[in-house]
Image (cartoon, rainbow, N blue to C red):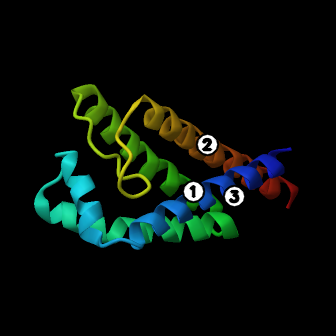
Amino acid sequence: MTRWITLALRLVLGAIFLYAAWTKLRQPWLVFALSIDAYRLLPEWAVFTVARVLPWLELALGVMLVAGLQLRLTAMATATLLAGFYVAMIYSFSAGSGIDCGCFGVGEAVSARTLVRDGLLLAAAVALVISSGRRRRMSLAMA
């Protein structure tokens, strides 16, 4: 059962990360930089760096999740990234800023709906970390 749960979690998260990367990479990086800057959490140089690097990181994580490469490490990186996004979104939502989320390109404000969605994605990533760790321990025990 753990094997099927792990497979489902990694494929769903991988597809979502691939889609998120695609939506950001198909538009100029400065558009995404505006969404990042709206959070008011990073200095200008970091906003530009994150806007250029994050879509490629999401793409790499999506590919690695779908392919099942370095699953434990990939799952931990995914969960860490989603946790960072989630904290930033909660901060923005609690401040009532109504900014663009930037999750899947432009046009979606941070709202209760986006918080629920990203909270579920974070929970799925944490479950994948746990699931991949159990699967690894079971395979080591059998060896």
Q: Amino acid at mark 2?
A: Ala
| Residues at marks 1 and 2 touching, judged by CB atoms closer than 8 Å | no
Relative to 1, is 36 above or below?
below
Which of 124/111 is in front?
Answer: 111
Q: Residue at x 51, y 71 (%)?
A: 60
Q: Amino acid at mark 3?
A: Leu
Q: Residue at x 43, y 43 (%)?
A: 83
Alpha carbons under labels 3 and 2: distance apart: 11 Å
Tell me residue 92's x, y (percent): 27, 35
Which of 59/24 is in front?
Answer: 24
Q: Which residue is the site of mark 1?
A: 16
Res. 11 mark: 3
Dot 3: element: helix
Tell me residue 14's x, y (percent): 61, 60
Which of 12/6 is in front?
Answer: 12
Q: Which residue is the site of mark 2?
A: 124
Within 10 Å of disc 1 (Cα), the crowding (few <14, some 14-19, many 20+) is: some
Relative to 116, is 104 above or below?
below
Res. 1 mark: none
